[in-house]
Amino acid sequence: MNSPSTSSRPRGKSNRENAENDGSKKNQIVKHGKVPLKEVNQDPSIPSARPATKKTDRRKQVEEYNDNVPFEGNNYPEETTSPIDRRFLQLTAVPGKKHGNGEQSTGEFLPDADSMCVICHQEECPKGKTELIDCHGHMSGEMIGVERITTLNKNFEEEYKKEYKELLKKDKNAPYRPKKHLIPERPCRSKFHESCIMKYNAAGYFFQYAARLECQAKFLCPLHVCNRCNVGHQRQTAYAGELIECAKCLRAFHIDTCYPAGARDQYVEFKMGDKTKKNFEFLICPAHAEEESTESASSEKKKMAVKKDSGKRPNLKACCSEGCTLESKLINCRSCVRSFHAECREVIKIDGQPVSNDLCEKCLCKDDVPLNVPVLALWENKDFYLAKTVGWYDFPSQRRASESNFEKLGYTVVQWLSGDSTAKTFSIVPVQNVAPLIDEYVRLAKPGLRSFWKKTFDDYNDKGCLFGPYVSKLVYQQWKTSKLGRNITAQVPTTTSIAGGCTCKDNAEKCSDESCDTVSEGVECPPECGDSCNNRNVSKGFVNPKLLLRDTKIKGYGIFAKGDIAQGEFLAEYVGELIDPPEKARRLQIIAISRDFQANQYMMDLGKGWAVDAARYGNLSRYINHSCDPNSTSYHTAIVKGGRADNRMYERRVCVRATRPIAKGEEITFCYQMESTVEIPCLCGADNCTGYMGRGEEEAEEDEKTKKIGKAKKDTKKVKPNKKRLRAPSVREATTAKKRQISEPSSRAVPRPSSSQQASTSAPRRPRSFNAQDPVEAPEMASRSSRVASKVQESCPAQESHRDEARRVSFRTRTSKCE
């Protein structure tokens, strides 16, 4: 790959760096301005890569990669890789010194960090290439004093909110300007070969998918993705929020929601380029417990005693794979308290070697148990009790000195749970003796405790299934009107003829109603109709100025009315890439391979197998959310692409208009009516909300009965739902789904108005010479949910590794939905 940011290119001095040499300094607390980028102990003897800090450089680099490198699956989870050690980060302990509640050490990046791959630890990759790609991420965890800068900023903002209330009493127009510490953007030191990073897939890491324009559009190493969220298929959330890195391996976690139980804080002091010293907050994850215990073991006898003791440990008598209904023989994991079915374990090889038959996937892949989740914990190798994982410093201070395992890797603090909420009892237990509570474990409770275990599981499941920070994303690039996707041949136009053409008078109302022949035909007027024509909104890239983009704080971005909108008023074209059937199938296959439960799907059907995809490029219309009681609808139109007046050539497009009056401040919505057998939760809050996006079974079956024979082609036929509808993974009930602060699934389907709706809305009529098999009134959904197994998986053999129907539908792998 021809990368503009490789280790073979020298970095020149910028005006900003020259200013640093003049001794100019920035205050720590400022309102505006930027902090210069500084290298962390960069070896001056080695030519450094020019970090792709400019957005234009990064965009060009990523776009070239997406255009020129074919998308490939990384064989996860059947053939996975182990987490890679950070060999180029050298830590030196400072004896007797602590920083806050963690150990203090000094850190230094070795010179090899600038010339070797962080994955293979070699200058030359197995394919013989030496070109290294720079990570586009930045170091996280920089501190001021004993707090992270981000934590200080949160505290500043909370204090400022109180002050701001007083300011508003004096001045209603007072600007909201909290003072914050600037967070320096210190470039990540990771560099990697293209072939090495594409093969690395520990914990579901997928470099090529993250680099896609509809995902993160950056080259990011594993230190910039949350390990837990990635394993849980939350692969948009995984890259958002504040992360804490492991100081010993290429793993990171959300510090607030995914911090691993039993991990230990590690504070590292680095020398900056200007010879100042800065502290960064890291952790040592529990995956390194075995290394630490081996180093501290005094004799071979002690090791044998540990192994002998672990053999007495009982195992849970239920499969650790949530949703499992198999009744075959359980296999006891020899490393932890879990049990599993051979059919439920998907990992076949790790680092190319067959895995042991008596280890569960959690132990094979070194997955962690997060803090603040309900678990079953083994007490003195006798029985399992309900508990919750908590942090080290929740353990009573008066008992810490007497506990030899306090802050020791491989152990964690648990708080035992009982019906008495006032009683708080804590213990330190081995991490291997803890398993997150899942539905299958509830039935193991004694009759008197089963209801309490069930309530504990339900309470957590309703709140914590979709963990991680809230995510709201903007489109990669704004477009005014739809364009052909890259390498897509021109869409086959549809011809139509309009007797006499447009004869409307040239005034403010020109071509605004069905008295105009072209409006009545449901197509746009030709260019010669003039600038005063009101029926060329798509060609002009017109977006209703009354539309306002706003973060809903619940379901991602949404569109709201800045002013009153009349019934039938044009809102916008649904803008995106125009893609042909092969490209549509390829993109759906990528979503299936990615195993991302938050994948961006914004396809709308254009007919004849074509679709408009707003995942990468679009306008405000792509942010319109679903509602069971919508106030707008989408419809097909066509724009002139050539031809004579008596034989125009048209190209299809999708537009959105209001179906009823919309008041100022009201959210603009339409009904997705997703054609899926998976129930995806609806967060609209309407009185008639069904709890899920999509048509009900009765409506879908009625559509099937009334559909004309041969009307829909094979690739656009609706799939008749099964009588028993399946729920989407990580979702329990519709009522609880509404309460969750999650990004609303973005698969776009378009409503088909019922007969009563058609009577009340003035949908454009179908052009006379359009094929009767290609209706234009309502675009059909061009894609189904990425979590559905049927057609998408039929075109994607890589997904056929799931061993039973329930697992194929849910894509559950290596983790329960609440783990």
Image (tube, rainbow, N blue to C red):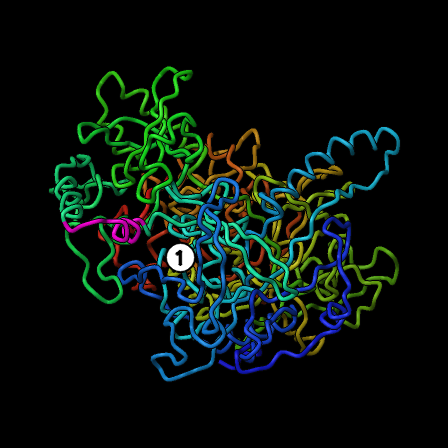
- Residue 613: percent from the left, percent from the top? 54, 62
Residue type for callout 1: Lys
- Residue 715: percent from the left, percent from the top? 41, 62
Query: Is residue 331 rendered to the left or right of residue 519?
Result: left
Q: Locate residue 688: give its quadrant.
A: top right
* Element carrying mark 1: loop
Any part of residue 491 in sight:
no
Up the image or down, 232 lies above or below 214; here it is: above
Residue labelled with disc 1: 248
- Residue 692: percent from the left, percent from the top? 46, 38
Quarter that holds the C terminus: top left
Q: Based on the picture, tell me whether residue 4 belongs to the magenta stretch.
A: no
In front here: 200 or 65? 200
* Image point (27%, 49%), residue name: 296
Q: Locate residue 440: give its quadrant.
A: top left
Any part of residue 688 in sight:
yes
Magenta region's main secondary structure? helix
Task: Please report the bounds of the magenta region as a residue range.
Answer: 289-300
Query: Is residue 231 rendered to the left or right of residue 534?
Result: left
* Image point (63%, 56%), residue name: 765
In front here: 276 or 222? 276
In front here: 254 or 113? 113
* Image point (27%, 28%), residue name: 442
Circle 1 packing at 10 Å, graded few (<14), some (14-19), many (20+), is many
